[in-house]
Image (cartoon, grey):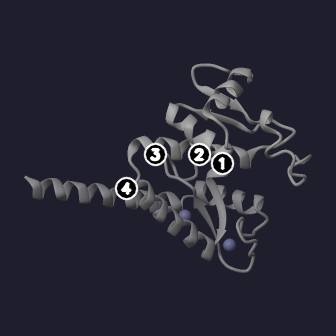
Amino acid sequence: MSKKSHEVKQKREWVSRSEFSEQYRSPAWQKRRLERLDAAGWECGNCGDSESQLHVHHTRYVAGRKVWDYSDEELQVLCEACHSGAHALKERLNEALASIPGFDLGKVVGYALAAAATNRLDCAGNEGVLTLSTNEEVLGAADYFGVDWHEIFEIGAQGERPTARRLIDLRMRNAMACSDPKNAGSQ
Ligand SMILES: [Zn+2]
Ligand SMILES: [Zn+2]
């Protein structure tokens, strides 16, 4: 019984792996890959290296989605060294996440979402919207901004889309990111 289920599992993995490599050989992936390389100016998005071989790295995989069916943000152009660095970091992150109890994990997610939204923030535009879905995420985001969680709720209430999901318009936090002259103007 247990031997049989083990065989089934192995077979399934093998199928999905061969499907993967088939997708990576397909013209659809080649096209998407070249698009990303062109957009990146044929250099590593992390260190700027243009001499080494470049890879197009998936920041995440979604079950059932074709390898070319990912947004620009999810397909990063990286040199070989930065690519293996990114994968090593992901493994470290998985290790770290596995050691965090669930209730604290929500806070970590909120913290990470706040950091990512801040990086996307365009002082002229509306890219800085942060969506938090649990109380733990609100607590984590509050930690990131160094504010009390009550303040997060207040910001959400003044935003343009204050609904069941707590949306924070980070444009209201211009003191934090937009005072940086590097971020001013642009796009
Ligand atoms: Zn690099
Ligand atoms: Zn990768």
Callout 1 amino acid: Ala
Vertical relation: 97 (above or below) 87: above
Q: Position of residue 133 (x, y in %)?
A: 53, 31
Residue at which label 3 appears: 105
> Which residue carries the number 2 mark?
111
Which of discs 1 and 4 lies nearer the camera? The answer is 1
Q: Which residue is at the front of the view, 114 or 32?
A: 114
Q: Secondary structure at mark 3?
A: helix
Name the residue carrying label 1.
Answer: 115
Q: Residue furthest left?
A: 1
Q: Identify the image quadrant of residue 151.
A: top right
Q: Closer to the camera, 26 or 126?
A: 126
Q: Which mark is residue 16?
A: 4
**Would you say the residues marked 1 and 2 are in contact, meaning their CB atoms lie under 8 Å apart?**
yes
Q: Residue 47 in the image: x percent, y percent? A: 72, 71
Q: CA distance from mark 1 to mark 2?
A: 6 Å
Q: Which three-letter amino acid code belongs to the residue tagged 3? A: Leu
Work out whether mark 1 precedes mark 4 in sequence or the reverse, and give the earlier one. Answer: 4
